[in-house]
């Protein structure tokens, strides 16, 4: 099962790409121009390691578990016993940094997890899952199967955790990819290129505008069933001008079951905390003597805490691979904070749900099409909605004159000539799939229905829909005529 070994400190295999001999430019210019006219390959800068993440940040809605303020969350009754099991004097360690050997460019090994950013036009490639296929996502909801893996990851080092070109199976080899146009996060565990195709131990796909959890008992690319990227310490946040607004991922040597927000088991040590448990740095810990970037990191541990995401080394906190990190500063700073400076928050704690502020006001809009799956691929176009309860999340806020404060939409939903009978259900983008339908349809007909659709309570301005046909996708149109706030 996906676990977190000391991958950042273990040398990986080096796979060197073949050299490409250069040809005189004058002899190939005409051919290059002809090729450019016939095709439009992605520019080299379109895929990169550590690129800009889609706004707004932090990743996922503000009410997501990674972004939940736990300052006033109650302490678990068993907190002291958990801390003693960890080892009260055990200091933290930053499980991230830059190159293992900065003086040797040929050494591929790295500290921390790289992440890849790609545009929405990045081709999707199939991935064969060899360990947890029945708990893995073959593709993003509302999109064709596959993962947008750049070809550079096959032969170039430092695109996958550990640094080895093409990944591997001897360690975690996580590959994290963000489709910045469609706001989708793709994550793979033990990603590796196998002769002519990609394989992985498991894979999970997350819509960045949704709070949807994994199915109960399902893993992800991480043992706990959580997304990895939103829980990493990132350089841009540590050295930014504002506070870090999310929790961090960390590991312990063992675990015991799982609690919310986790969904998967990786251990049964009854003395250990479960996956999904939160540690909160005590408010009394003095941060004034640390450098500003370290203060931001430690303050986030007070406000948002650490979430136990995997089995690994005690009190290792994960972050991104970035050659700008200075481990001569980070290592002693983290080591100076022992486990006894933390409380364990009440297991499975969730913030109370705010009550409604009263009746909503309705505002009309000029009729506007929010979704038409018959159009080209994209956040407000195709492909059609896959069958079997597949989920699609649509960002409504900012489209068609819908403001960020909108709470619900007045819409007309149309299903265009479905090849099979079925039904669609709509729900807030941060909610679970309900057991009711919004529109039922027979085969071969155009069916429309008026509805009021609630948006995510997180303020992300998203709605979700699922298609319940037996085996065929459906074409869906959503026309907006007003909103409630």
Image: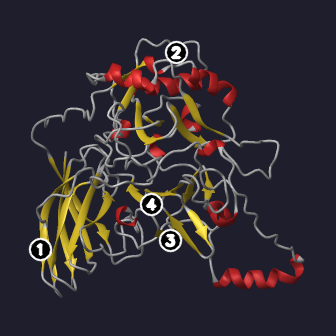
Direction from residue 8 to residue 57 in the image, left or right: left
Distance from disc 1 to disc 2, alpha carbons, whole Å, reads: 58 Å
- The answer to which of marks 2 and 4 sits earlier in the sequence is 4
Q: Is residue 113 visible?
A: yes
Distance from disc 2 to disc 3, alpha carbons, whole Å, reads: 45 Å
The way the protein has been coloured in the rendering is: secondary structure
Pointers 3 and 1 in contact (C-beta within 8 Å): no
Direction from residue 169 to residue 12 in the image, left or right: right
In the image, which disc is placed on residue 287? 2
- The answer to which of marks 3 and 4 sits earlier in the sequence is 3
SS category of the residue bearing label 2: loop
Distance from disc 2 to disc 4, alpha carbons, whole Å, reads: 39 Å
Distance from disc 3 to disc 1, alpha carbons, whole Å, reads: 32 Å
Pointers 1 and 4 in contact (C-beta within 8 Å): no
**Relative to residue 363, is residue 167 depicted above or below?**
below
**Relative to residue 113, is residue 271 depicted above or below?**
above
SS category of the residue bearing label 3: loop
| Location of mark 3 (residue) | 124
Pointers 3 and 4 in contact (C-beta within 8 Å): no
The x and y percentages for residue 345 are 31, 26
Residue at 50 percent across and 29 percent down: it is 242
Which one is in front in this view, the residue at disc 2 or the one at disc 4? 4
Which one is in front in this view, the residue at disc 1 or the one at disc 2? 2
């Amino acid at each position: 099962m996906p676990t977190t070994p000391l991958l950042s400190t273990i040398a990986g295999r080096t796979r060197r790409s073949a050299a490409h001999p250069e040809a005189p430019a004058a002899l190939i210019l005409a051919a290059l121009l002809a090729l450019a006219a016939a095709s439009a390959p992605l520019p080299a800068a379109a895929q990169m390691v550590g690129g800009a993440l889609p706004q707004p940040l932090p990743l996922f809605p503000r009410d997501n578990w990674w972004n939940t303020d736990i300052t006033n969350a109650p302490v678990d009754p068993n907190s002291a016993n958990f801390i003693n099991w960890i080892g009260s004097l055990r200091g933290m360690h930053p499980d991230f940094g830059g190159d293992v050997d900065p003086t040797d460019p040929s050494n591929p090994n790295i500290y921390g997890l790289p992440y890849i950013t790609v545009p929405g036009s990045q081709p999707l490639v199939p991935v064969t899952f060899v360990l947890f296929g029945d708990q893995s996502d073959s593709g993003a909801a509302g999109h064709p199967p596959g993962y947008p893996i750049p070809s550079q990851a096959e032969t170039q080092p430092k695109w996958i955790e550990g640094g080895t070109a093409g990944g591997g199976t001897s360690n975690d080899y996580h590959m994290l990819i963000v489709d910045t146009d469609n706001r989708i996060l793709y994550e793979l565990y033990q990603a590796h290129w196998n002769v002519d195709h990609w394989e992985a131990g498991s894979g999970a796909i997350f819509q960045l505008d949704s709070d949807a959890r994994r199915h109960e008992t399902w893993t992800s690319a991480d043992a706990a069933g959580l997304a990895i990227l939103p829980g990493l310490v990132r350089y841009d946040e540590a050295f930014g001008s504002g506070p870090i607004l999310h929790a961090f991922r960390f590991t312990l040597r063992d675990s015991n079951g799982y609690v919310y927000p986790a969904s998967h088991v990786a251990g049964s040590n009854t003395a250990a905390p479960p996956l999904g448990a939160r540690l909160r740095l005590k408010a009394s810990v003095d941060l004034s003597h640390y450098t500003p970037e370290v203060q931001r990191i430690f303050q986030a541990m007070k406000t948002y805490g650490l979430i136990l995401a995997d089995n690994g080394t005690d009190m290792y906190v994960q972050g991104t691979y970035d050659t700008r990190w200075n481990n001569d500063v980070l290592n002693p700073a983290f080591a100076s904070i022992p486990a006894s400076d933390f409380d364990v928050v009440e297991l499975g704690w969730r913030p109370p749900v705010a009550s409604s502020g009263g009746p909503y006001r309705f505002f009309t809009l000029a009729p506007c099409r929010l979704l038409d799956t018959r159009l080209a691929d994209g956040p407000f176009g195709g492909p059609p909605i896959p069958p079997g309860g597949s989920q699609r999340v649509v960002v409504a806020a900012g489209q068609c004159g819908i403001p960020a404060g909108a709470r619900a939409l007045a819409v007309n939903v149309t299903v265009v000539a479905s090849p099979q009978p079925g039904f669609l259900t709509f729900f807030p983008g941060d909610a679970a799939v309900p057991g009711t339908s919004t529109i039922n349809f027979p085969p071969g007909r155009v069916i429309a229905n008026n509805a009021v659709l609630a948006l995510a309570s997180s303020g992300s301005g998203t709605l979700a829909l699922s298609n319940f046909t037996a085996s065929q996708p459906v074409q869906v149109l959503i026309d907006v005529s007003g909103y409630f706030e």
